[in-house]
Image (spheres, helix red, strand yellow):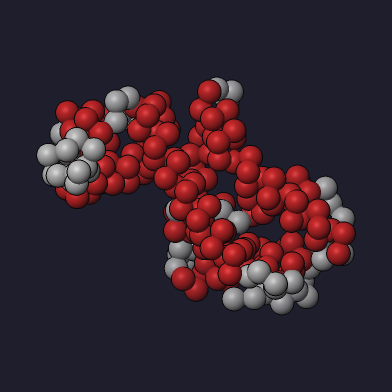
Amino acid sequence: MALTSSDPRVTRPSADATRERILTAALDLFADLSYEGATTREIAARAGVSQPSLNYHFQSKEALWQAAVAGLFAKLDTALAQRIDGLRGVDLLTTAKLVIRDFITFSAANPQLHRIITQESKGEGERIDWLVDHHIRPLYELTTTMFERLTELGAVPDIPAPFLYYLLTGAGPTIFVLAPECQRLAGFDPLSPEAVQTHADAVIRLLFGPEAAPIA
C-alpha cells in the first residue's frame, strides 16, 4: 500500500526545512557559545521557530547537539570519500595533497566543526568521548595511515604520524577559526577564496617541504 501524506512515516518538506534551520542555528550557537552556553530558546529564536517546534524535532538539547555535529561530520566524510573514490589509481602523494586541500577548503566553509571540537576538548566528558568514538577516530586512523605510508615513501619528514595529524588539524583550520583576529592583525579575510587556496598551498608546503608543488 502506498504511503499517503497522512502517514506518520512521511516527512513533510516543510518539516525538513524547519529541521535544517534548527540544525544550522544550533551549529552556530554551539560553536560560538559552547554546549553549556547555548540554550534551546536561543537556538529556536535564531532558527525563527517556536520552542515547541524545536522540541517536536529534537527531544533534548543533547539530541540536538548530536544531530548537528553528526550532520557536519557526514558532510566532511562525504566530501573526502568522493575525492578519494575519484582518485582511484592516482599515486598516493597526489591523492594526499588533493585530500588535504579539500579538508582545508571544508574547514574554511565550516569553521564550526573545529570550534566545537575545541570547546569539548577543554575538559573530560561524555561529549568528547562521543565525538572521538563516533566521528574523529575514523578520520584520525585514515589520516595517520596515510602519513605512515607517505613517511615510508620519504614524501613527508620522518615524524610520528600522530604529530603529523595534529600539524595538519592545527595548521589547517586555525586561521579560519580565528578569522576575526586574522582580519585585524594581517588585514585580509582568510575566508576569501583566494586566501583559502593560498593557505592550502602553505599547509601542503609545510607538510611536504618547501619545494612541494601544490596541486589545485
In which quadrant will I find the C terminus?
A: bottom right
Which residue is farthest left?
A: 6
The x, y position of residue 53, in whole percent, is: 18, 33
Nearer to us in this view, 191 or 137: 137
**Is residue 83 toward the left or the right of residue 38 in the image?**
right
Is 119 situated above or below 213?
Answer: above
- State which quadrant residue 152 falls in: bottom right
In which quadrant will I find the N terminus?
A: top left
Nearer to us in this view, 123 or 141: 141
The x, y position of residue 134, in whole percent, is: 55, 36
Name which residue lies at 28% across and 46% down.
Answer: 20
Name which residue lies at 78% across and 49% down.
Answer: 161
Name which residue lies at 83% across and 47% down.
Answer: 160
The x, y position of residue 49, in whole percent, is: 17, 39
**Is residue 112 toward the left or the right of residue 25 in the image?**
right
Is 85 situated above or below 144?
Answer: below
Is 53 situated above or below 201?
Answer: above
Nearer to us in this view, 90 or 102: 90
**Is residue 66 toward the left or the right of residue 80 in the image?**
left
Q: Is residue 152 visible?
A: yes
Nearer to us in this view, 111 or 181: 111
How many dots with numbers? 0
The x, y position of residue 72, in whole percent, is: 44, 47
Q: Is residue 41 visible?
A: no
Is 81 situated above or below 69?
Answer: below
Which residue is farthest top?
A: 125
- State which quadrant residue 54 falls in: top left
